[in-house]
Image (cartoon, rainbow, N blue to C red):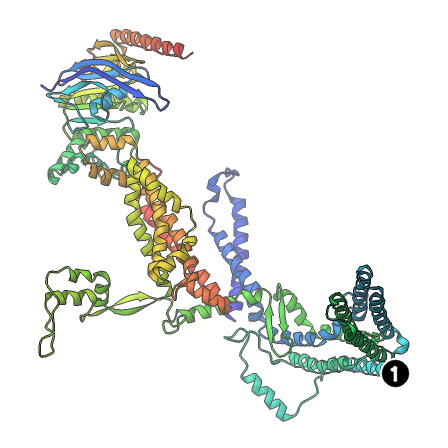
């Protein structure tokens, strides 16, 4: 219901902003000529129009509009699909689903095979005796086909069975169109059906793609028809055109082939090969169930009639199917028990479902794979101290660690106390620390980037100012920089492990190269007169570096960071795809394995949002720190 | 006495192609304390090279240059420089630019602030202390550059075409400012320009330089700078002597340019 309301609001929003935009164009100042970049300014109504369009497209192609306005349509279409599925077998026999009659197609194909084999045998190096024998087999097979295709050989009982089937289908077609179809069922059966319906989840609920049991009157009608049709089709396929002439020929050829095979010696491989191919063809013909043309005409007519009737009975459902289920529809499984979506509705999740699952994922108690998306956990300060302080600090303190005394007690000394602090073996209060998949990804990018900036900027500046540094470090950096970061990933993950350190190192490598290049460009782009001025104002080398060259390189450095953020973000997600147990890329990778389309879309959306937040933050920082850029 | 003495200064560059360029040849002059010298010449005559050597940014190939008792050997605070484009630090405000030298030498902050006020007053930028420099006009930026240089109280002020990029009106105002500062502080000033009028108007002494190799072509002693201190600059420009000197120098420079062009063809 809410989706329906939102859909209407979106349509109104789209059209009103288009109308507003059209109106604005007419009243716009006339001097705004084409090509003037000022014309691209403003236009927030077009932002509204664009947002509405994309949301509407999403709602439409995910079939969410269909669901909100016609919640029963999928269930009804499922029953229709069951009917279609039930007649599918028969349809394939006639030129309904295929271009030619199944028997015709079979004869065509096998005749081709026989002729090919014939000419092959003719041209082979076999003895004439064998050649004539093998060719005789093929001729016999041709006679088998003729015996089946000839209407004169068809027994009266087969004709009768076919007629019964046609009549049954016609009767079903007639009953199906009646208003009181299906006939009333017993009270017990009705109770059973109601029980089934009560436990049936709705369309798109967790673990339920399409509810399979009919919920409406129309659905019941189609379901009953499909059931009946299934029986008829089964019966139809029992009919075999096995006339006595054919059976006799079939037996005979089997026998002859067997005899000939027994005569063949072990080393007559070519003969055996040909014989195998011949016996395959003869087997296919024996099982073919070819009917003489026109024998099944009345069945075909009745099936076509039935199809017409079921289309007519769909009524408004046909329109809904065409317009609200774009790029596909609901299909039934071969067993006719369950149904599924086929088309965009399958892989494009419905916005409402996505939102519901997103909110579910955001719940700290749920999360994904027992880890929240973004939450906090209480962590002792001692753990953090232990993480920051290396253990060797205690080792380098003079003295020895305490030794136990005779009464079995250990008296700690100063060295031991320091070790306890360095390893976090002390009591401390806890503070909340963010955690979760999103936070982990964010932290990795942040740390990798920060390390890259801290190491890359000084080296880049140095390289921009010193002939030695530029020459010395250039080969290494220029060699590793152009390698796609992901190419390093397998190696780095092997060396540093799948956890944080590997990924942070990978990101460090990425951002380090970018920061070096940008800081170097910034340093070598400093105007000489500024450096001269600083010199004659009495600044020292360090002061010039700190007060002139660094601020002068800031625009390049910040632009470099902005680029690095984007590249790091992309690399991280791919690295999390490869290995790891947390992170937004990990979530997507697992969701991909389980075909959780909603989860995949959620991760894509979260990545987009985080990337955008990173970039907006960088833009804000750039605006605040280097307002002079482009104005010097 | 802090005289500036240049003794047979030679500067030879080697271009990347391997050509040898004689930028300066046997430049010798001496400048008394408190003198204002202007240097004029066609482009490529080595004016800026000379200034860079005096500032200590370049080391001469041969010869030496002495300020007071000390030979110049690298940049120093006693020689302040004003550049053509101001060369301001655009990430700093006006006041931060002006006190840059004092800050670098970690002078007392309160005194520094007082001095900045004073100097902004002198160059006519009262109340602009907190303005970012990128918001200033070209003339104002040059005023900041002047104040930034003068606050260090240098013995010698080097100006490298400081008014070259300004429009005519601003330029005239700035010329009076330079004269005013010269009078009030009594500093030794070397000013490089390619405007004949400016060179005549501001210079007590005027060197006309000639190119290839860069050398001093002619020296003038001029009264206009002291006249300009009292009177109106525009009046001086109409002075008969001024006009005749201007024509003489212009002809001289034209001849030099023609000589070069002839050589090139």
* Residue B46 image offset from top left, x and y in percent: 28, 18
| Element assignment for label 1 | helix
Q: Quadrant of residue A151?
A: bottom right
**Residue A554 vertical placement versus A51 (above, below):** above
* Residue A228 image offset from top left, x and y in percent: 71, 83
Q: Quadrant of residue A177?
A: bottom right
**Image point (29%, 43%), residue name:** A459
Residue A96 shown left or right of residue A345 in the figure: right
Q: Residues within 10 Å of mark 1 (few under 14, many from 20)?
A: few
Q: Is any part of residue A615 visible from this angle?
A: no
Residue B144 shown left or right of residue A494 in the figure: left
* Residue A35 image offset from top left, x and y in percent: 51, 38
Nearer to us in this view, A353 or A578: A578
Residue B178 shown left or right of residue A452 in the figure: left
Task: Identify the residue position indicated by label 1 in the image.
Answer: A156
Nearer to us in this view, B237 or A210: A210
Q: Is any part of residue B223 visible from this angle?
A: yes
Q: Chain of mark 1?
A: A
Quadrant including the C terminus of chain A = top left
**Residue A437 vertical placement versus B127 (above, below):** below
**Residue A467 vertical placement versus A249 (above, below):** above
Q: How many circles with numbers are drawn on the protein?
A: 1
Q: Residue furthest right?
A: A152
* Residue B98 image offset from top left, x and y in percent: 20, 34
**Image point (42%, 48%), residue name:** A483
Q: Quadrant of residue A193?
A: bottom right
**Image point (28%, 49%), residue name:** A454
**Residue A467 vertical placement versus B31 (above, below):** below
């Amino acid at each position: 219901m809410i989706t329906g309301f939102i859909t209407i609001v979106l349509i109104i929003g789209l059209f009103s902003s288009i109308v507003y935009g059209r109106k604005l164009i007419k009243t716009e100042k006339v001097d705004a000529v084409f090509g003037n970049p000022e014309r691209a300014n403003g236009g927030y109504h077009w932002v509204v129009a664009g947002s509405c369009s994309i949301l509407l497209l999403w709602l439409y192609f995910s079939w969410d509009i269909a669901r909100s306005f016609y919640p029963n349509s999928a269930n009804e279409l499922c029953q229709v699909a069951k009917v279609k599925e039930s007649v599918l077998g028969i349809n394939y026999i006639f030129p309904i689903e295929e271009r030619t009659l199944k028997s015709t197609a079979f004869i065509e194909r096998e005749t081709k095979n026989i002729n090919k084999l014939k000419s092959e045998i003719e041209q082979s190096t076999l003895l004439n005796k064998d050649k004539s024998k093998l060719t005789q087999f093929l001729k016999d097979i041709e006679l088998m086909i003729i015996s089946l295709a000839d209407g004169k050989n068809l027994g009266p009982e087969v004709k009768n069975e076919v007629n019964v089937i046609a009549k049954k289908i016609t009767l079903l077609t007639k009953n199906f169109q009646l208003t009181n179809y299906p006939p009333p069922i017993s009270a017990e059966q009705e109770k059973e059906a109601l029980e089934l319906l009560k436990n049936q989840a709705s369309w798109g609920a967790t673990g339920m793609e399409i509810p399979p049991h009919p919920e409406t009157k129309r659905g019941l009608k189609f379901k009953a028809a499909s059931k009946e049709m299934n029986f008829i089709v089964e019966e139809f396929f029992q009919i075999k055109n096995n006339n006595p002439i054919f059976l006799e020929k079939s037996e005979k050829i089997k026998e002859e082939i067997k005899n000939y095979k027994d005569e063949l010696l072990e080393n007559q491989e070519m003969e055996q090969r040909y014989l195998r191919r011949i016996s395959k063809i003869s087997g296919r013909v024996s099982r073919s169930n070819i009917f003489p043309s026109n024998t099944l005409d009345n069945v075909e007519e009745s099936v076509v009639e039935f199809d017409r009737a079921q289309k007519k009975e769909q009524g408004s459902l046909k329109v809904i199917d065409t317009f609200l289920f774009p790029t596909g529809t609901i299909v039934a499984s071969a067993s006719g028990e369950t149904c599924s979506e086929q088309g965009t509705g399958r892989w494009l999740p419905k916005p409402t479902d996505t939102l519901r699952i997103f909110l579910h994922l955001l719940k700290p108690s749920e999360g994904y794979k027992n880890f929240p998306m973004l939450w906090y956990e209480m962590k002792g300060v001692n753990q953090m101290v232990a993480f920051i302080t290396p253990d060797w600090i205690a080792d380098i303190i003079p003295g020895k660690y305490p030794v136990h005394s005779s009464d079995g007690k250990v008296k700690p000394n100063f060295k031991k106390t320091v070790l306890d602090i360095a390893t976090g073996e002390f009591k401390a209060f806890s503070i909340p620390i963010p955690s979760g998949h999103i936070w982990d990804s964010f932290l990795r990018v942040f740390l990798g980037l920060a390390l890259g900036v801290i190491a890359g900027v000084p080296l880049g500046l140095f390289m921009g100012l010193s002939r030695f540094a530029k020459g010395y470090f250039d080969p290494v950096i220029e060699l590793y920089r152009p390698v796609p970061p992901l190419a390093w990933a397998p190696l780095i993950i092997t060396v540093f492990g799948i956890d944080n350190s590997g990924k942070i190192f990978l990101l460090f490598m990425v951002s380090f190269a970018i920061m070096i290049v940008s800081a170097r460009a910034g340093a070598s782009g400093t105007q000489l007169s500024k450096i001269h001025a600083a010199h004659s104002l009495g600044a020292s080398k360090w002061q010039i570096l700190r007060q002139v060259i660094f601020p002068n390189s800031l625009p390049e450095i910040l632009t470099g960071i902005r680029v690095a953020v984007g590249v790091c973000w992309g690399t991280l997600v791919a690295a999390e795809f490869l290995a790891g147990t947390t992170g937004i890329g990990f979530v997507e990778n697992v969701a991909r394995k389980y075909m959780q389309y909603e989860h995949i879309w959620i991760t894509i959306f979260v990545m987009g949002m985080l990337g955008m937040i990173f970039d907006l933050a960088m833009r804000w920082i750039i605006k605040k720190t280097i307002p002079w850029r482009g104005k010097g | 006495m802090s005289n500036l003495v240049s003794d047979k200064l030679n500067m030879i560059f080697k271009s990347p192609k391997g050509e040898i360029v004689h930028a300066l040849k046997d430049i010798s002059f001496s400048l008394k304390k408190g003198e204002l010298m202007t240097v004029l010449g066609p482009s490529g005559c080595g004016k800026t090279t000379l200034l860079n050597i005096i500032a200590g940014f370049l080391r001469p190939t041969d010869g030496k240059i002495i300020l007071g008792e000390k030979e110049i050997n690298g940049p120093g605070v006693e020689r302040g420089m004003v550049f053509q484009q101001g060369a301001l630090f655009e990430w700093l405000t006006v006041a931060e630019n002006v006190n840059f030298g004092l800050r670098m030498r970690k002078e007392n902050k309160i005194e520094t602030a007082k001095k900045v006020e004073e100097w902004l007053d002198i160059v006519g930028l009262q109340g602009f202390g907190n303005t970012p420099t990128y918001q200033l006009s070209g003339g104002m930026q040059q005023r900041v550059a002047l104040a930034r240089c003068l606050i260090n109280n240098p013995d010698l002020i080097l100006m490298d075409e400081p008014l070259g990029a300004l429009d005519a009106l601003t330029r005239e105002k700035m010329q009076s400012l330079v004269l005013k500062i010269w009078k009030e502080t009594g500093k030794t000033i070397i000013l490089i320009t390619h405007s004949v009028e400016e060179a005549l108007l501001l210079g007590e002494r005027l060197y006309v330089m000639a190119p290839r190799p860069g050398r001093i072509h002619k020296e003038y002693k001029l009264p206009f700078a002291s006249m300009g201190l009292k009177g109106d600059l525009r009046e001086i420009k109409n002075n008969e002597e001024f006009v005749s000197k201007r024509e003489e120098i212009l002809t001289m420079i034209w001849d030099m340019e023609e000589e070069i062009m002839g050589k090139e063809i």
